[in-house]
Amino acid sequence: MPDRKPRKDAARNRAAVLAAADSLFARCESPDDVTMADVAAAAGVGKGTLFRAFGDRVGLIRALYAARLEPVEEAVEAGPPPLGPAAPPRERVPALLDALLCFKLDNRHLALALEGTGSDSPYAAAHYARWHGLLRAVLEQLPGLPDADFTAHALLAAVRADLVEHLAGAEGVPRDTLRARLADFTARVLGDSVPG
C-alpha cells in the first residue's frame, strides 16, 4: 500500500505540471519566456519535482507537445478518412499537412519551443522523423511521384513552426487563409507529378 500514494502523487503532479506549462506557453510573448521556475510555481510543485519528472526544460516541452499532439496522432493512426490510414493517399497527404498546420496554429509557442530545442538540426528530432516518415510512406503510394523523400521534406517545410509563427503572428494572415494556401500549394506539388 505505501507504493500507491507516491505513484498517485507523481501522476497528479505530472498532470498539474503539464497543465501549468500548457497555460504558460499559450499566454507567453515568446517561448523563451517560460522557465522551469515559472512552471513549478504555477503547478504548485518544487523545482526538484519538476526536474525528477521531466529531466530538463527540453524534456518538459517534449512531454507537453506529445500530450497535446496525442489526439492528432490517434486520428492519423486509426481514425477515419481523410486523416486515417484508410484514406486514399491523394486525400491523406493534404489532410496530414492541414492537421499539422492547425495543431501548430493552436499551439504556436509550444511548437516554436520544441522546434527550437537542443539538437544540431531540427531534422534529426524524433517528432520530425516520425512525421517525415509517415508523409514519405503516403507519398510513395502515389504513382508518378519521383522523389517521395524530398517531397515530404519540402511539404513539411511549409508547416514549420517558425514559418507558421511568422505568417500568423508577424504578418497576421488569418487561419483560413493559411489553410487554403497550404491546400493549394500541396495540390500544385502533387498535381504536376501525379495523375488526378
Image (tube, rainbow, N blue to C red):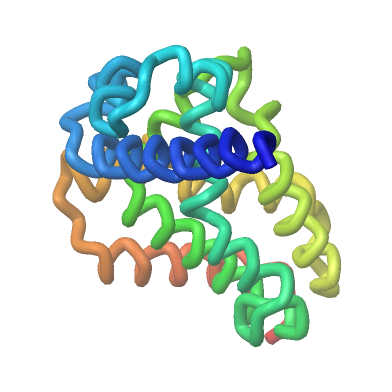
Q: Residue 111: tell me if it is visible.
A: no
Q: Position of residue 34 (x, y in %)?
A: 28, 23
**Is residue 172 placed above or below 90 in the rendered structure?**
above
Q: Residue 143: tell me if it is visible.
A: yes
64 vs 86, nearest the viewer: 64
Query: Is 189 situated left or right of 99 in this image?
Result: right
Q: Quadrant of residue 17?
A: top left
Which residue does the image show at 65% across and 44% down from the upper left? 153
Q: Quadrant of residue 4?
A: top right
Query: Is 105 situated left or right of 91 in this image?
Result: left
**Is residue 166 placed above or below 53 in the rendered structure?**
below
Query: Outermost residue toward the front?
Result: 1
Which residue does the image show at 50% across and 58% down from the upper left? 100
Q: Position of residue 38 (x, y in %)?
A: 26, 21
Q: Position of residue 88 (x, y in %)?
A: 73, 84
Which residue does the image show at 72% across and 46% down from the upper left? 130
How many marks are shown on the rendered structure? Answer: 0
Which residue does the image show at 65% across and 86% down from the upper left? 80
**Is residue 55 placed above or below 2 in the rendered structure?**
above
Query: Is 129 situated left or right of 112 in this image?
Result: right
Tell me the quarter of the image containing the N terminus: top right
176 vs 148, nearest the viewer: 176
50 vs 181, nearest the viewer: 50
Tell me the quarter of the image containing the C terminus: bottom right
Q: Position of residue 158 (x, y in %)?
A: 48, 49
